[in-house]
């Protein structure tokens, strides 16, 4: 990255992230050589109240993953957790379709108590992360209440009812974010974007994980004004998602279910797109959209996979960004010899 003294090996990186896919990229970055410059802005539009407690699924998944306390079999929740509380609630006749583990309940109890005292949600999230030993800043895009709503064949559903209770089965008609028009961006998220050298869009659902972040008034504008190199990692591989309903939601929102749809979803915001080898046939079409294209293995299974994808993405963005800064006429991935 360019500084007054030249190029630094520790660029300031901002990761925009949802839940599972975002947490994988966050883990890769945190364990990479780029950890020192990393900040994460997570999605809060999946947040919802359950059993009288405010639950923040994506932020918790990021937090538990970076603390190495995530249940890796499920991809969410705390490892080695039990479900005695849920069993007792079920015995009382309570609908317990949204699973929360016994240890997990502590997070939600603390968050809810602090919110009722008027403590900023950003402060609460930072405290939880700090207590779990996480040094990487996990930032909220807004402290206001924003919630994804899905219009389906069953009517309007909150996101968790669609995603968990109904297993993403109802046909989607439309998607909206309640509260988005009046939400205010947090100063921490705006400052992180302003100071960033590289902004990475995790392979999260572009509609309901990254979309709500971009829809908060002021966030998209801050990204467009930022001089950072903005690179997205596609969550779509060969027309399919690894996990979750991103393909269905792209289609319902009028986008192609492919890396081209991902690119169109982020039109005007990103400079480059990372795609899997299985999508190499779309390279030319992406270049014609004005994007740099990095083709690598984007499937992340092991920690090594995550670190490799994170470092290859940042290495590439760093070189493209610096070279473009040296050459005011522009610089592409093709000219760099990467493709």
Image (cartoon, helix red, strand yellow):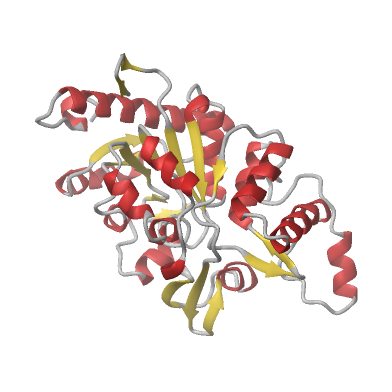
Up/down of 64 relative to 213, above or below: above
Q: Is residue 229 left or right of residue 86?
A: left
Residue positioned 69% across, 37% down in the render = 130
Q: Quadrant of residue 336?
A: top left
Residue 207 seen from this side: yes
Residue 75 seen from this side: no
Q: Is residue 64 left or right of residue 252?
A: right
Q: Nearer the viewer, residue 44 or 144?
A: 144
Q: Count of labels shown?
A: 0
Residue positioned 30% across, 62% down in the render = 256
Q: Nearer the viewer, residue 243 or 176?
A: 176
Q: Position of residue 269 (x, y in %)?
A: 28, 50
Q: Position of residue 180 (x, y in %)?
A: 45, 67
Query: What is the quadrant of the C terminus in the image?
Result: top left
Q: Is residue 168 left or right of residue 176?
A: right
Q: Nearer the viewer, residue 142 or 67?
A: 142
What residue occupies the far left of the structure in this picture?
329
Q: Position of residue 258 (x, y in %)?
A: 32, 56
Residue positioned 44% across, 45% down in the render = 202
Q: Position of residue 147 (x, y in %)?
A: 53, 68
Q: Quadrant of residue 138?
A: top right
Q: Quadrant of residue 272?
A: top left
What residue occupies the far top of the structure in this picture?
5
Query: What is the quadrant of the N terminus in the image?
Result: top left
Q: Is residue 12 left or right of residue 267?
A: right
């Amino acid at each position: 990255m360019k500084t007054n003294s030249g190029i630094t090996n520790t660029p300031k990186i901002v990761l925009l992230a949802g839940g599972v896919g975002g947490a994988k990229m966050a883990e890769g970055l945190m364990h990479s050589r780029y950890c020192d410059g990393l900040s994460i802005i997570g999605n809060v539009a999946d947040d919802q109240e359950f059993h009288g407690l405010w639950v923040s699924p994506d932020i918790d998944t990021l937090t538990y993953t970076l603390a190495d306390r995530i249940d890796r079999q499920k991809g969410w929740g705390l490892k080695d957790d039990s479900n005695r509380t849920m069993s007792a609630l079920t015995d009382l006749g309570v609908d317990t379709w949204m699973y929360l583990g016994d240890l997990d309940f502590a997070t939600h109890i603390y968050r809810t108590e602090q919110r009722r005292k008027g403590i900023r949600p950003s402060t609460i999230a930072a405290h939880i992360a700090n207590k779990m030993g996480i040094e990487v800043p996990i930032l909220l895009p807004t402290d206001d209440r924003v919630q994804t709503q899905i219009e389906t064949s069953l009517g309007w559903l909150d996101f968790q009812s669609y995603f968990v209770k109904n297993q993403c089965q109802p046909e989607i008609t439309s998607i909206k974010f309640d509260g988005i028009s009046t939400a205010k961006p947090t100063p921490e998220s705006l400052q992180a974007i302003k100071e960033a050298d590289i902004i990475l869009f995790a392979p999260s659902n572009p509609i309901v994980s990254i979309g709500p972040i971009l829809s908060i008034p002021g966030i998209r504008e801050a990204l467009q004004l930022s001089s950072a190199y903005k690179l997205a990692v596609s969550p779509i591989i060969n027309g399919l998602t690894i996990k979750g309903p991103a393909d269905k939601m792209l289609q319902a929102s009028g986008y192609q279910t492919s890396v081209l749809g991902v690119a169109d979803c982020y039109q005007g915001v990103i400079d480059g797109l990372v795609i899997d080898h299985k999508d190499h046939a779309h390279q030319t079409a992406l270049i014609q959209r004005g994007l740099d294209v990095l083709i690598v293995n984007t499937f992340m299974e092991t920690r090594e996979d995550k670190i490799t994808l994170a470092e290859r993405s940042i290495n590439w963005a760093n070189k493209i960004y610096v070279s473009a800064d040296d050459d005011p006429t522009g610089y592409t991935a093709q000219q760099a010899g990467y493709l």
